[in-house]
Amino acid sequence: MEPVIPSDRTLTPLVVPGAFSSWFARLQHVAEARGDALALTGVSGTWTFGQMMRRIDQIATWLRDQLPAGDEPVGVMVAHDVDVVLLPLALTRLGRVWANLDPFAPPARIADIAELSGMTACIVDEAHREMVEGLDVSVTTILADVPDDAPVDDTMPLPDRSGQDPFFLVFTSGSTGKPKGVVQTHAQHLNDAYCARARWDTGPDDRVSLVFPMAFVAGPVVMDVAFLNGASLHVHDARTHTPRATVDWVRRERLTVLCMSPHLLTAITGELAADETLDGLRIALTGGEGIAGRDVDAFRAHAPGVTFVNGFGSSEATSTTQYIVSPDMEVAPGAMPAGRVVPNRELRIVGDDLEPVAPGEVGQLMVVGELISGGYWRNDEENAKKFDVLPDGRRTYLQGDLARLGEDGVLTLQGRSDTAIKVRGYLVDISEIEDALRANEKVSEAVVIPVVVEGEPTRLIAYLAQRPAVRPDSVADLRRQLREKLPEYMVPGSIVLLSALPRNERGKVDRQNLPKPTDELQEIDDTSYTQHELVVGGIWANVLGLDKVPLDGDFLALGGDSLSVEEMLADVGERFGIELASTDLLRSPTLREFAEQVRRGAAANEAHPDFVHLRVRPADRRVFCFAGAGALALQFLPLARRLEGFDVTAFQAHGLEKRAKPDWTVQAHARRALEHIRRLQPNGPYRLLGHSFGGLVAFEIAQRLRAEGEEVAVLGLIDTFLPDAAMDETAVTGQFGRLTPREPQGMRERLQQVIAPVSEMSLQHTTPLRAFVRLARARTAGLVRYRGQQQFDTFFYQSVLAARRYRAQPYAGRAVVIVGQNSGIDDGSWHKLLTGQVTTVCVDGEHSALMREPHVGQLSAALLPALEEQAEASIPA
């Protein structure tokens, strides 16, 4: 039961500068005044202020004897729940400086942070224990498993801390190729809480969201805003939940203050129905990156009476400016201003000589005040570049942004003055990415260019040259190497390979003359192309939207997907009078190779029409995959590329690419595939993965194998709808989705159009004639060949009819259930049938996008633990 918030007049409003110089001393005052009021809530528990302070003392007492002696920082790596707040505050209670570590960061980056901070211990939960223990640094690991009845030392004194003492560390991208630790002070974060009270009247009646990760400065700032003003803090991990789940959480928690990134705000806006509102919300704040007025208006349509706040700041200065939009205020559709300076800060626009520029001119932004960061942790060189002290004792920080300050005091940003830039809300130092690319011994030179377009996400493009004497890495290999070293948001979306980077007269890289990526590459000389290469190249260019295609250009790497593959194959077949399958492209992926195959004809290339080997590896590490309704087996190629060390074979519907009578039941699909599986792998253990409708096929195959006495090591169900559930609009949203959104109707409408003639006709979604035509076309699947999208559509409808007839039985084997964004699948719906060990994982990305980059990275990360565990167990000693 959530505690009732009492009417309380004893809480002293926070003022800075004022009575408190220690962050924790202010929290104690709030707890004494608001002891019975709600303070903190998350998945694993709910605490009043009094209960929370008792729990913090309990954790501090428990940690005191386990932490190494000294005052070195202590790391914290736990899931984004209440412990991500309680554990750091227990360390503050002990007088220790802490650093929250992001569980989503690569191990190499975590190791860098551990080494640079000098941390001697790291508190972890069980889920992240192995990662920290595997770091190549000397850190004591302490499991965050504090018993509920652990003793409390009531005599433990409160550490004596002043406003300028270090509170905690956050790490940002650094120009040396290593992250930089930014010292956060008590006074700095007291001021952030004061700004919220002074600017938008945050107080005891507020319910504040903690969605920002605590490893980045925005997370602790939100904690300041709530706790130090007597409000409650509501913790939610948006990175492991879908936007729809986040919308439901916002409503369930009755939030009044919503703080999140612009990206997440626009994502949840897209989840709201036209008449759906978030009642009770009074403040919506975004920060970390810019936001467009059009996105603000789209959200405000669902939040009547909300005041919108566009926050701007940095790890070094935290809250710097805010642009506040009242409920009745109109905003321009483009980029919003950074806003007016917050209390206890001064803004200066300076030139290269650090002297103020003329009013209204663009210059570098300098933040002045006593209440900013204490500098970079043990980094005198960087401190000398960015920080200084004025004669009156105030500190200055050179932000690195170019800006203009208007006569009305409103700050507008004009870009960056250094190599750092905001990407998806994170400050990224471009040189760190360049250093990661150059770490590859095959790369001779590299440069990364940010592309900033107003109202659009910042994109990163990498240009590099590889050494001529070695076998070069592919773009896919380079991206994989970067993902092992850098967070996802730092991996360039485009990588352009050049023989040499262009240079100017001073010998520096001529960035203005770098070619545009992919669709606007340098001129291609096709005068030496053969006739087949010219004709096939023209077809490829037309399908991919390119002017010309290089001979060694890979169709999929150039932007091709399942639909464009089929469109291209149909065009080639019509032009040359031959019939090719997607497997032919897989074996001959470049224009040079594929044109030669066309020249010779497909007869010499034996390929099975129902399955394809996507990755050939040791036979004792096989994975069998099953494509969704109307989808090619080729859809598993991005996932197969990430399943290193596994032999991956993917199946598609019989008759999809070669004319044949299709299978009309899930059982028939399973019987046909099982015959091939048994020939490829006579005995278990078997590993089965199915996407969408393919999940039902995998499920049925798993049942049959177990009935025959075989071991099924793991069954992976990727965004697969439970067939026994009522197939209403809510339950089936997105489940058997299109391969591409080329027609205006959505997945929900489309499925309803198929279901309607099978059960009751729904005139709201389709006309009887259209439904009859689609049902009739489904009956011709495999027997009549349709062109392009119609062929996919036909097998889509046919698979839906097959799914409607299927009744699944309980399954006791191990299973992994993947639920995609906006799928409409209840996270626990499969648990009615899956009675064995079940792991359920929510992954970003809509139904079909799960199978493509970048979401396939999360998908493989969710599947690999189960596959690897069983693979190790199945390899003979």
Image: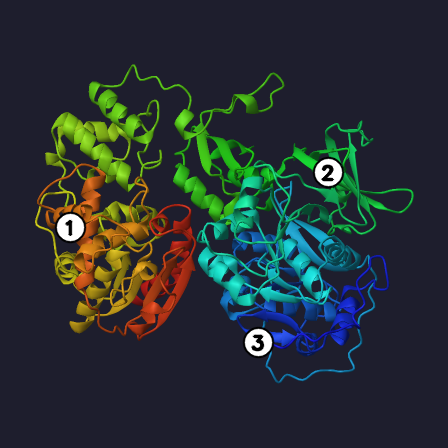
Q: Is residue 264 visible?
A: yes
Mark 2: give few (<14), some (14-19) or many (20+) Cα within 10 Å.
Answer: some
Judging depth in this view, the residue of 539 and 453 nearest the camera is 453
Query: Residue 339's x, y, as percent?
Result: 70, 42
Mark 2 or 3, closer to the camera: 2
The residue pinned by badge 3 equals: 145
Residue type for callout 1: Leu
**At 39% across and 37% down in the image, what residue appears?**
474
Q: Nearer the viewer, residue 65 or 41?
A: 41
What numbered label is drawn on residue 410?
Answer: 2
Label 1 Cα crowd, 10 Å radius (few <14 / some 14-19 / many 20+): many
Measured along the vertical axis of the image, is residue 307 above or below residue 236? above
> Dot 1: what SS?
helix
Amino acid type, callout 3: Asp
First along the sequence among labels 1 and 3: 3
Measured in 3D between alpha carbons, the distance from the residue under mark 2 to the one under mark 3, in whole angstroms, is 48 Å
Look at 81% across and 67% down and name the residue there: 12
According to the picture, the residue beneath numbered tag 1 turns out to be: 775
Q: Quadrant of residue 708?
A: bottom left
Kindly indicate whether the residue at mark 2 contacts the one at mark 1 (C-beta within 8 angstroms).
no
